[in-house]
Image (tube, coloured by chain):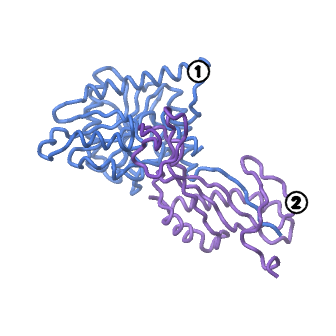
Amino acid sequence: MTARIVELRQGILKKNDLAAAALRARLHAHGVFTLNLVSSPGAGKTELLTRTLQRLVARGVRVATLVGDLATDHDAARLRAAGAPVQQICTHGLCHLEADMVGAHLDGWDLADLDVLCIENVGNLVCPSSYDLGEDLRVVLLSVPEGEDKPLKYPTIFNSADVALVTKLDLATACAFDADRAAAHLQTVRPGLPTHWTSARSGEGLDRWVEFLLARREAARATRARTAAGASRDVPPGARAHDPTSLARA
Amino acid sequence: MHELSMAQGIVEAVEDATREARRVQPPGARPATVRAVGVRVGTLSGVAPDALLFCFDVVTRGTPLDGAALAVERVPVAIWCPTCAATLELAEAPPFRCPRCDRPSADLRRGRELELAWYELDDDVPDRVPDAGRAAVRDVAPIHPSPEDRA
């Protein structure tokens, strides 16, 4: 009697990968450009996002935000001050957001009325790295007080990011922050990672960051238009355009 | 990082996959048993293989997969270097630099895998219908010799 090997090749996180692919398709069908902000707790996501939303609203961009936390809706209350719709996702202890949670919280909105969706993930540099939320742009924040070598300590999430925002630059002197070392470490874990140096307090770097965001949105829209027109594009359906290894998780 | 829920996911996926195999067994046959499960874990996947092994052991106790071995294949990081026009494995990452020409590359081709690759099924069925869909069947020498084989 022979035992036999059955090959599967199935992602372990298949449930979330499938949900994320469906969510991405749904968002793209309505022309929505989606950001997923990740960082350690207290790196300044909410403040940075509030200032980002203010600038987007001022430019007439139709933006909405989902913010994830284990408990409280404090962040949603702060983000609402920017004047755009916000929904709080309370995870009740789960340390990261997952695609099905994001999808469920979008049901109350008409995506046809939306240009940009911002998702503020739970503050955590470990778990969110594996959970695709259907985003177009994964934004990792590194705050000055955390130190220059943070990227080396958390290579998985920094390597998975599409852009880095260094935050709280106004504290650089007080923290003896070495910006050159931080920049080098970011490049070590993710060569070519675009980086923006910001301070929500002073406003430094925020306009440039928003320009970058809008340029990426435009590029994504142009790519989708070209794909729809029949031009070949080496991106598998349901994957982020700049994540070649998502092929392995199909 | 979530090795427990991943172990549960592995068990659910294998149970789903073997449901059909168990369904087509002739009446009176010994129930199909999963002897081993193979997973591929990239070094940049954020998953600790030891933790996954421990959690798999915990999660399978008292289930049909009780006693099944978990084989973890670690997949090293490999990047595509446009200068060398090759996919090259990195002994250590970071840094993400070509081992030949030292050029930095963010084009990761391997290393983030989190994949259920195969399972070893002992199901008493000599002539098998290949599983539908993605699964492929390949005969291999028994990894766990049966008492009959040893006799």
Task: Describe residue A166's horizontal placement relative to residue B35 as left or right.
Answer: left
Q: Is residue B41 above or below residue A215?
A: below
Which chain is rendered purple in the image? B
Q: Quadrant of residue B25?
A: bottom right
The location of residue A173, given as percent across then percent down, is 12, 42
Chain where mark 2 sits: B
Image location of residue B14, percent across then percent down:
66, 59
Label 2: which secondary element: loop
Kindly state the secondary structure of the residue where label 1 is placed.
helix
Residue drawn at point x = 71 percent, y = 63 percent: B120
Amino acid type of the residue that numbered disc 1 sits on in the rendered structure: Ala
Residue at the location (56% across, 31% down)? A235
As drawn, is B63 to the left or to the right of A83?
right
Q: Which chain is blue?
A: A
Amino acid beneath label 2:
Asp
Q: Are marks 2 and 1 on the same chain?
A: no
The residue indicated by pointer 1 is A228
Q: Residue at x 17, y 36 (%)?
A: A201
Residue A194 % position (x, y): 35, 33
Residue at the farthest front position = B100
Spatial CA distance of label 2 from label 1 is: 46 Å
Where does residue A50 sit, x and y in percent of width and height?
A: 27, 35
Q: Quadrant of residue A230?
A: top right
Q: Nearer the viewer, mark 2 or mark 1?
A: 2
The crowding category of the residue bearing disc 2, from other C-alpha atoms within 10 Å (few below 14, some 14 to 19, many at least 20), is few
Instruction: Determine which residue is flagged by label 2.
Output: B127
